[in-house]
Image (cartoon, helix red, strand yellow):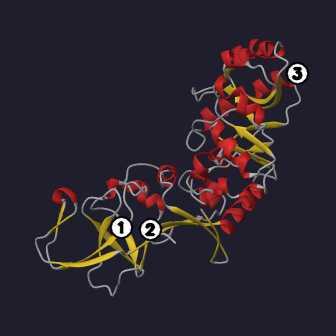
Amino acid sequence: MRNTILEVNTEKFLNNIDKIRAFSGNKMIMPIIKANAYGTYINKNLRILNFFQIVAVAEVQEAVEIRKLGYLKEIFVLNQPSIEELQDIYNYRITIGLSEKEFLKQVYLPIKVHLEIETGMNRTGIKLENLKEFMEDIKTNQNITVEGIYTHFSSADNDDEYTKKQINVFQNAIDIVKKDYNLRYIHCSASNGLLRFPETISNTIRPGIIMYGYESFKGAKDIIPIEPITTLKTRITYLKEVEEGESISYNRRFTTDKPMKIATIPIGYADGLRRELTNQGEVIVKGEKRKILGSICMDSCMIDVTGLDVKVGDPVTIWDNELITVEEIAEKCNTINYEILCTISPRVERVFMEDNKIIYRL
């Protein structure tokens, strides 16, 4: 067992799914498991994936990996792929989002698509005024089967008026496409949308970070009582006593003002522990919050354990979702909880837990 691990509680994950499903009125759930399932590696756990009829990723290669894992149901790629990926899309029975005209013209193998509609995100998607023409182009290519339609809200967490405009544009697009196609999947609501606009026109929802128990905006847990599913842990690998006036780590960014006991822990910025936490981050040792001292190194950092009865091998928790939360860490790093989760590196072992027991390692 490695010293630094990310524990992933699969029971809490599935409980979160049940709560989301009940809140949404039992709409089809298309879980967003891109970026290694927000760093949790749920996407590599076939038993969990098989709870869903369809899953969504960002890239074709992510879909290929899931198919190779043994997942036999539908996989949807949210982002417009390149034509060079068409063979994999066909070989691995991958459904893709489609909005780019040149890609459409070059499709030479049978594939299934969901049409992405531009409603105000201005990232990718077919503009409403171009939709009829785009559909005429689809009709000229018999390799393309339209199974769904979707869009993405830009500000569902904080701008009701703009989101309602997006919904209206999306409804108009659905009305146009439905004249020619039976739409199996209609989806527009990611975490923010499904929480704040649960009565939208979709029959499918795309929960992301809330599946993993983390808020997509402050107060999300008041709407659905989700529980965080990850705990980041490590162990003390070295202990030393230092005198007053000694410097700690690179560039001498911390100098002791008294005799101190210092522990080294094997987690650094290459593991995803952000350098912004230098001299301001904290960890949990023996149930207490303790300061990170000096510059965070690539593979390790130092912490203050003065006055604690600790030894090499004792556990240290980076976040436990109670004394220290992912949101607290994100705030100190001037970022969002999504980024903190997604950037925990592959060399941190993922350990899946049920009933407080390890059931699977990655």
Residue 199 picture quarter: top right
Instruction: Find out whether the residues at labels 2 and 1 contact each other: C-beta distance under 8 Å.
Output: yes
Name which of mark 2 and mark 1 comes first in the sequence: 1
Q: Earlier in the sequence, mark 3 or mark 1?
A: 3
Amino acid identity at mark 3? Lys
The residue pinned by badge 1 equals: 282
Say which element carries label 1: strand
Q: How far apart, in angstroms, are the residues tagged by discs 2 and 1?
A: 8 Å
Q: Mark 3 falls on what kind of element?
A: loop
Rendered position, 281 above or below 35: below
Indicate left or right for 246 with 137 as reference.
Answer: left
The picture quadrant where one finds residue 167 is: top right
Find out whether the residues at labels 3 and 1 contact each other: C-beta distance under 8 Å: no
Give the number of the disc on residue 101: none
Q: Earlier in the sequence, mark 3 or mark 2?
A: 3
Q: Label 2: which residue?
A: 324
> Does residue 279 sit above or below 284 in this rendering?
above
**Alpha-carbon neighbours of circle 1 within 10 Å: few (<14), some, or many (≥20)?**
many
Give residue 164's position: percent from left, percent from top. 67, 34
Q: Give the residue pinned by disc 3.
A: 179
Q: Residue, x 76% and y 38% (percent of image)?
A: 92
Q: Quadrant of residue 130?
A: top right
The answer to whether 258 appears left or right of 159 in the picture is: left
Q: CA distance from mark 3 to mark 2?
A: 52 Å
Residue at x 42%, y 48% (from the top left corner): 335
**Element under label 2?**
loop
What amino acid type is highlighted by mark number 2? Ile
Q: Nearer the viewer, residue 274 or 150?
A: 274
Q: Is residue 150 visible?
A: no
